Amino acid sequence: MFSLSWRYLWARPLSTALNLVLLSLALASMAFVIIVQDQAERAFERDLAGIDVVVGAKGSPMQLILSGVFHIDVPPGNISLTEANRLAQHPQVAQLIPLSLGDNLQGYRIVGTTHAYVEHYGAELAQGALWTAPMQAVLGAQVARHTGLKLGQAFEGAHGLGSGGAVHEATPYLVNGVLAPCGCVLDRLILTATESVWHVHDDMHAGDGMDEVEKAELAEALAADREITLALLRYKTPLAAASFPRFVNQSTSMQAAAPAIEITRLLHMVSVGTQALRAMAVVLLVVAGLSVFIALWNAVRERRDDLAMLRMLGAAPQRVALLLLLEALWLAVLACAGGLLAAHGLVALIGQWLMDSQSLSISGWQWIPAEGWVPLLALGVAVVAASLPVASVYRIDVTQLLNSRSIS
């Protein structure tokens, strides 16, 4: 029965190919939405893990989260190191991790911070060690792979958070370590001591025309007013979420943004696009189901002689009806395989594009439980589309059919 139904299916290659393409596109669209939504939520949860609030310059809270946690936006400004240290002593704060931005290497951001940033994500070293002095750098796995830098090699950062800025040739970094892949934001960052970022920009502000006394006076002035870009904070108790952000926003010159609130708002805005894609996939499923129904209905009319012969040879009505149902199931199986592969391939391409643009880390080849709905959808469409043709085959009156053929 399986072999005969397969031969019947491909006896009409053009019709079968059209139905297969339509059903595959519909299932691929549905699977694509499921995979991307799951991958994006996983990426957000992975990078946000353990971060209760982000404190930075006043401006857009969303911008603060995107720049400070995911490093895919420009921060609104800098904040005073003195004020940040004062927050670290707040009774509701368990940990404060400072981040200083401003430079990049081939688009990968150089982040001045402390060892606590690496420990927060549980990242491990693949080579070397963490920095022990200014101007030593630790590369994320993606950075090391893309730039080809090795332990002991020197590199110069470029001013700004995007490629194309002025290169700080006078203040090179030395690669002191390489992190193992962690699937988190650290994979695409270059980490160093906060003092390294200050040193690079102190040298930039000094200029070539200043003598040693002027440079010393400038360094003293800069040291008295140190700044960082933002800080990642962890609360001692969840109850702090009710009062601490309000305290920061009202009592300081800084701004506190809650990642959970902002990311929920972002996902809500993005959900409009996912709903549109789902609606398009549903329309394609309906069209594909109608196309399969028409093809099977026409197949019943074309094969009346074959069906009558099968019945004369002793085939039961159930087996003849099953033959037609198996054709629809073959289509469902092929379309399901093609749709899932197409969806994962497209997600992989998008993930590669995001990786090249130093954005979120998305993998196209991770299978998720929610994809189990795709084979069920394919099976459901096939069964519904084949129900009327199968019923008509089951009810065929062989005697009447043979008499009509003999008269004609």
Image: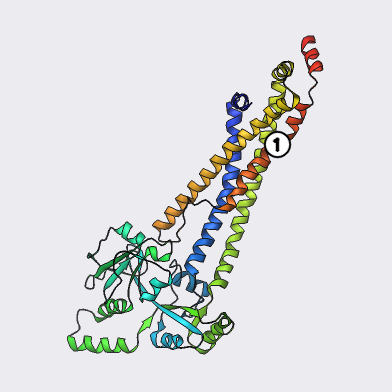
The residue where tag 1 is placed is: 385
Q: As displayed, is residue 5 above or below residue 150?
A: above
Drawn side of residue 243 relative to residue 299, left or right:
left
| Residue 284 seen in the current view | no
Crowdedness near tag 1: few (<14), some (14–19) or many (≥20) residues, C-alpha within 10 Å: many
Q: Is residue 275 shown left or right of residue 318?
A: left
Residue at left offset 67%, top offset 40%: 381
Q: Position of residue 317 (x, y in %)?
A: 75, 25
Quadrant of image for the C terminus = top right
Q: Residue at x 58, y 38 (%)?
A: 335
- Residue 228 in percent (x, y) is at 38, 80
Give coordinates of residue 213: x percent, y percent: 19, 89
Q: Residue at x 55, y 40 (%)?
A: 337
Outermost top residue:
407
Q: Decide which of 123, 69 is in the foreground and name it.
A: 123
Viewer-proximal residue among 257 and 166: 257
Front-lying residue, 165 or 392: 392
Q: State whether residue 204 is above or below residue 150.
A: below
Q: Amino acid at mark 1?
A: Ala
Mark 1, secondary structure of its residue? helix
* Quadrant that contains the N terminus: top right
Q: Is residue 176 above or below residue 337?
A: below
Give residue 352's position: percent from left, percent from top.
42, 53
